[in-house]
Image (spheres, helix red, strand yellow):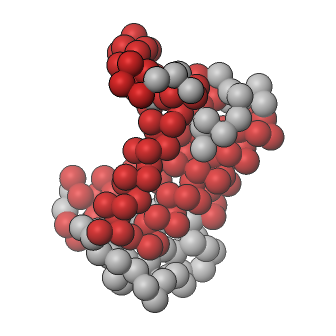
Amino acid sequence: MANAASLTRGERLVIFLAGVLPDLDGLGLLVSLQAYTAYHHVILHNLLAALIFALAAAALSQKRLTAGLLALVSFHVHLGADLLGSGPGWGIQYLRPFAAKEWLFAYQWNLASWQNFGVTLVALGLCLLVALRRGRTPLEFISPKLDARVVEVINRWFGKL
């Protein structure tokens, strides 16, 4: 999502974070398995958290509307993937804290499944495409130098698009 528009590295970072930070509610695992199962997919996997992440992305960006909308989409892609591929019975309380109804999808698949493997391959393919077309990978957030080296190798292997 962060590469869907022409944005700065910092703007891309906040959109990327909107798609991964919802899993902070899984840190309960550091306390106990009971805390994990009680709070993961509850505290940060809901509409209120989505709006907070989108507003934060908009506030931190020059292109407020673009960044806010892409952060909202990034967040919801995460929720959709969790709803489909976290395992049967692992739902989302989307309207929390206003309503505690859990949303489940009738055809959820296991975390260790061929479907999640396929989704991972598609995501890696998209990262490869962005590297070839835009000259960057998610490593840009960790080390721009390492990112440039990886992009250089990818271009050597596949040719620049």
Residue lying furthest bottom? 106
Which residue is at 63% across, 29% downward? 11
Which residue is at 59% across, 60% downward? 76
Based on the displayed image, in which of its 4 quarters is residue 87 positioned?
bottom left
Q: Identify which residue, 118 or 25, lies in the foreground.
A: 118
Q: Is residue 142 visible?
A: no
Based on the displayed image, in which of its 4 quarters is residue 25 positioned?
bottom left
Q: Is residue 37 above or below residue 140?
A: below
Give the image location of residue 93, x and y in percent: 51, 75
Which residue is at 78% across, 35% downward? 64
Give the image location of residue 14, x and y in percent: 58, 35
Q: Is residue 74 above or below residue 62?
A: below
Based on the displayed image, in which of its 4 quarters is residue 41 positioned?
bottom left
Q: Identify which residue, 29 or 77, lies in the foreground.
A: 77
Which residue is at 51% across, 22% downward? 160
26 lies left or right of 8: left
54 lies left or right of 39: right
Q: Is residue 85 visible?
A: yes
| Quadrant housing the N terminus | top right
Q: Identify which residue, 107 or 99, lies in the foreground.
A: 107
Q: Is residue 147 above or below residue 82?
A: above
Q: Identify which residue, 153 or 42, lies in the foreground.
A: 153
Count of labels shown? 0
Give the image location of residue 107, x and y in percent: 43, 85
| Quadrant housing the C terminus | top right
Give the image location of residue 22, x and y in percent: 47, 53
